[in-house]
Amino acid sequence: MSASEELERIAVKHATEATQLDKQGSRGLAIAKYQRAVEILLKLCALYPNSSQNYFYMEHVDSYRKRIRELQRQESRQEPIESAASGGEAKFEQLVLSEKPNVKWEDIANLSEAKRAIEESIIFPVKRPDLFPLGWPRGILFFGPPGCGKTLLAAAVATEIDATFFCVDAASIMSKWLGESERNVAQLFQEARRASMNGRPAIIFIDEIDSLVGVRHQEVGGEVRARNQFLKEMDGIIDKKKVLHTYIIGATNKPWALDEPFRRRFQKRIFVPLPGESARLEMFRIFSRNLNISDDVDFHDLAKMTEGYSGSDIRDNFQAAQIRLVREFFENGNPDDKEAKPRPLTMKDFRDIFRIRKPSVNQSMMGYYLKWSEEFQAA
């Protein structure tokens, strides 16, 4: 065991004891244990300033210090005891969103290959599981440049099959009380399986999944345990003997950062590229649904002008054009008159915006995506 792992083990011990004492109402002893855990974590950060885990250590330090202040106030006022454990449970509830997102297939331009893979992996098995004697993929990875619809795809799936949708921030799982990261992973999957057992499919969507299961050159105990727990839970979902409709969808802008064991557990690895000309044309029609567009606007010309733009870039530019129009209306029109409206958006408005707002995706990065796709794509 390395020195850093030993220090973390001691910090876990003090933090665990502090939580137990806190739960039992021993405020004074809990404060002392929390303070000792803080001291060790700060020492870890000082000894290993370049460690990737320092951000999470400081998250724990802030949490412990906040709890110490709360306990000190309770000590001085003799307030009723509030358990740190119950606070942890409340925080976990904030990690997931189980309400159905309002995104439909028609809200997503093109991406026919990704949609087809989703139908084969999720929608068809949910409707007719009897047609899949060998089981079906339960782990799906969307990879590609940012702003191309990876998150929208996952949300649309949840809407299409009326699923319980768990939208998880990977960093939040690792920023809980020290030593409880793996418990949070287990609880997340347990909640998803419970929702599935009640007859409703469950989708766990983890954005920027590389931040949770990416390759690490230096790992500490807590991070290793959480990743091992994640592997165990994914294996439980992927087990083809089970008929539960529980799925995990990951999205990443850096697929090459994924550790090999996790990459293998995503049976479907789907490239979500920058939109082509036909996809951009479809996006213009989607984004202009609620806008007042002049007859001189030629979406075909705009589609040719916007090579290299992501879907997010195009939406932002449409928004910027509308904002510029509204600004003009407030400066030169009569905004106090509720019946007055801005003029329609013209071709010149769009040309001006697209001239000054460039694509956000570095074109040199596209070669990396294509190379990784050639090696590991599994649509």
Image (cartoon, rainbow, N blue to C red):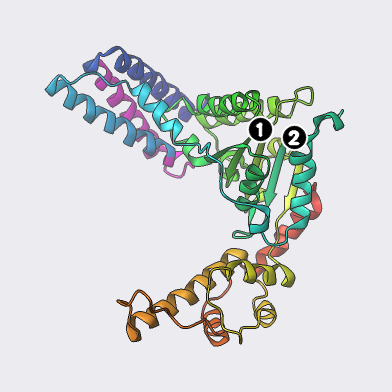
As drawn, the label of residue 66 is none
Q: Position of residue 169 (x, y in %)?
A: 51, 42
Residue 5 lies, with reference to residue 163, above or below; the image says above
Q: Position of residue 356 (x, y in %)?
A: 51, 81
In the rendered structure, the answer to whether residue 222 lies left or right of residue 145 reads: left
| Label 1 sits on residue | 201
- State yes or no: discs 1 and 2 in contact (Cβ < 8 Å): yes
Tell me which segment is drawn in magenta: 29-55
Please report the residue visible at 75 percent of the width from the left and 37 percent of the height from the top: 264
Q: Position of residue 286 (x, y in %)?
A: 62, 66
Please report the residue visible at 74 percent of the width from the left and 50 percent of the height from the top: 270
Q: Does 167 lie within the magenta span?
A: no
Q: How would you classify the magenta stretch by its main secondary structure?
A: helix
Q: Does 48 lie within the magenta span?
A: yes
As drawn, the label of residue 126 is 2
In the rendered structure, the answer to whether residue 315 lies left or right of residue 246 reads: left
Query: Can you see residue 137?
Result: no
Give the Cα separation between the discs numbered 1 and 2. 8 Å
